[in-house]
Amino acid sequence: MTLFASRTDAQQWRDPVAANVSGPEPNGDVTIDGLTPDTEYWFRFTDADGRRDTYVLGGPARTLPVTGCVASSVVDASWVGGFIATVTVRNIGAESIDSWQVSWQWPGDERILSIWGGQAGGDGSAVEVRNVSYNGMVEPDGTTTFGLLVATSRAPAAISPDCTA
């Protein structure tokens, strides 16, 4: 299968943006990496010997938009017995998100004493923080934050959070 950015390019078999050779199976899924999210593509087929199908022209097929979030953290202050950290949640998608959850693993004996801008959960060293009512909605490329006051015998250099929307 060959992908094109426009119907005209597909009709004329010119300037392909991607090509993928799959097996001789007549049905199945094809995954092509490197395509632009939320974009229309047109496609044409070739046979196992590379001969172009002169009749079948498909499309437009639209790639899915990017969705989701990423999280990053900063240890704002630390002292013997604890630290304060700020975690930033960024919407990396093309659509607004209406809720998020950030999770990470503590490397030692850390425990949250206080949290603001989030609702803590999890069990043991596994931490989960969900949005609260006022900061769940995050616009595309927008951010929100939450903070933590943590007790520990040794403050970590950083927290490595994962985010899901």
Image (cartoon, rainbow, N blue to C red):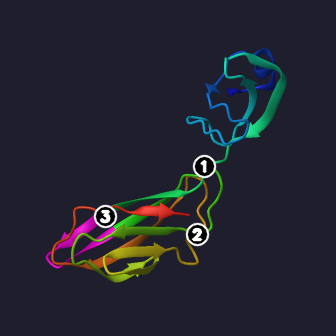
Identify the residue shown where x is 38% and y is 72%: 147
Q: Along the horizontal axis of the image, is 43 left or right of 124?
A: right
Residue range of the region highlighted in magenta in the rendering = 74-85
What is the x, y in percent for residue 55? 86, 22
**Mark 2 element type:** loop
Q: Amino acid at mark 3?
A: Ile
* Front residue of this view, candidates 65 and 17: 17
* Front residue of this view, candidates 38 and 77: 38
Q: Amino acid at mark 2?
A: Ser
Q: Amino acid at mark 1?
A: Val
Q: Residues within 10 Å of mark 2 (few under 14, many from 20)?
A: some
The answer to whether mark 1 and mark 2 are in CB contact below 8 A is no
* Front residue of this view, candidates 154 and 37: 37
Location of residue 57 (image quadrant): top right
- Earlier sequence position, callout 2 versus callout 3: 2
The residue at the far right in this view is 55
C-alpha separation, residue under disc 1 versus residue under disc 2:
16 Å
What is the x, y in percent for residue 4? 71, 25
The residue at the far left in this view is 80
Q: Which mark is residue 159?
A: 3
C-alpha separation, residue under disc 2 versus residue under disc 3:
21 Å
Magenta residues, dominant SS class: strand
From this view, report whether residue 135 is shown above or below residue 94: below
Q: Which mark is residue 99?
A: 2
Magenta region includes residue 75: yes
What is the x, y in percent for residue 97? 62, 62
Q: Which residue is the site of mark 1?
A: 66
* Front residue of this view, candidates 164 and 96: 164
Q: Residues within 10 Å of mark 1 (few under 14, many from 20)?
A: some
